[in-house]
Amino acid sequence: MSIIRSVFRGSGAYLPEKIVTNADLARIVDTTDEWIVERSGIKERRIAADGELTSDMGLAAAKAALEDAQMDAQDVDLIVLATATPDQTFPATAVTVQAELGITHGAAFDLQAVCSGFVYGLSVADNFLKAGQHKRALVIGSETFSRILDWEDRTTCVLFGDGAGAVVLEAQEQPGGPGDRGIFTTHLRSDGRYRDKLYVDGGPSSTMTTGHLKMEGREVFRHAVTNIASIMRVALDANGLSPEDIDWFVPHQANKRILDGTAKKLGTTDEKIVITLDRHGNTSAASIPLALDTARKDGRIKDGDLVLMEAMGGGFTWGAVLARW
Ligand code: UT7
């Protein structure tokens, strides 16, 4: 029996021009290139220019995704923008992107699940498309974490960067079998008991300031490996698949050691994991679409490939999306 699925029509990405290497950071805080590479796998990150906003980067990624999809912005009737670093407290950064794209119909809103934002965004958009409420969605992850970092805290400032990525999803009728294209299942989890392990110490209703990122790195790391491996299992089991069936794992890009740890737990090989964190660090909600776009444009992810995406972040929030490109 045929079924409506959210099919990936295109992807796009944007990274700011300014590159900050580990050596550059070693001039600001007490750190070394060796420590950062060994503990995280990150070699450099991008930092947004003065006046360059989350909406600017999200717009650039969205335009690239629309071009890749060979689609006009007017065809889009839903924009879900995942970010923890919006331009303003309100309105949503998504409506700025919507206006810049010249779209005046449909809906645009922000979604806040920190590093899990893109996975949450895909899930939300997928459910709208499957329900028939919207036809074509832009799902964007865009972040300017450089603006919420404490640049004197070596334990956090070396890990994050700025950037944006986007995909275009379209509701399409598919045969309803394992060879379908599009999203098969999405799986979201959160556990607010851990909200003080990774947070920003400011906000409109608490301090009336923006605040800075705080993290208990070791604790986050420990939970990340367990939660990510478990949600990947859930996604595989829900589809009757094993890790060998997956063509590409596209994880949230936080730490190479987290990726190694989860790969080991799952029994997968490194060659199937798309890793881009060495070039842009942890870009939170932007990291999965940045990696997706890289692997599509360099020819690794091809039409028909099975892709498993996963993320874990502040909240804690975590989740996975299983799809055929
Ligand atoms: O997107 C989801 C959110 N974030 C994450 O997933 C990040 C999760 N956590 C991590 O990636 C890792 O825990 C870190 C990369 C943050 C840290 O690695 P670690 O192996 O857990 O190191 P640690 O925090 O246990 O620190 C080890 C040592 C400490 O020194 P002492 O106490 O052993 O003397 C730190 O003070 O490394 C020190 N250290 C540094 N040294 C040089 C911490 N940051 C730095 C630094 N440069 N930048």
Image (cartoon, grey):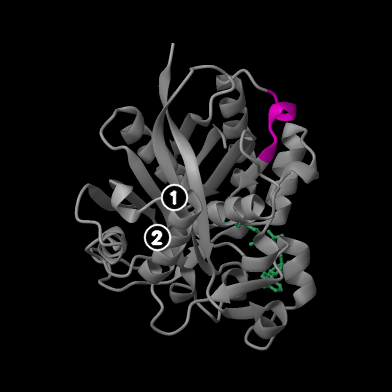
Residue type, numbered disc 2: Ala
**Residue pictured at 38% horizontal, 72% vertical:** 211
Q: Which residues are magenta?
A: 242-248
Does the magenta segment cover residue 48?
no
Disc 1 packing (10 Å; few <14; some 14–19; many ≥20): many
Placement of 120 over or under 1, stated as above or below = below
Quadrant holding ligand 1? bottom right
Q: Is residue 56 left or right of residue 266?
A: left
In what quadrant of the picture does the N terminus appear?
top left
**Residue pictured at 67% horizontal, 85% vertical:** 24
Relative to the observer, which residue lies in front, 213 or 177?
A: 177
Relative to the observer, which residue lies in front, 151 or 103?
A: 103
- Which residue is the site of mark 1? 117
**Residue pictured at 49% horizontal, 40% vertical:** 8
Q: Is residue 198 left or right of residue 170?
A: right
- Which residue is the site of mark 2? 84
Instruction: Find numbered disc 1 in the image and state the secondary structure of the residue it sits on.
Output: helix
* Pointers 2 and 1 in contact (C-beta within 8 Å): yes
- Residue 289 in picture, x, y percent from top left: 53, 53
Q: Is residue 162 left or right of residue 258?
A: left
Residue type, numbered disc 1: Gly
Q: Residue furthest top?
A: 1
**Residue 120 in which image quadrant:** top left
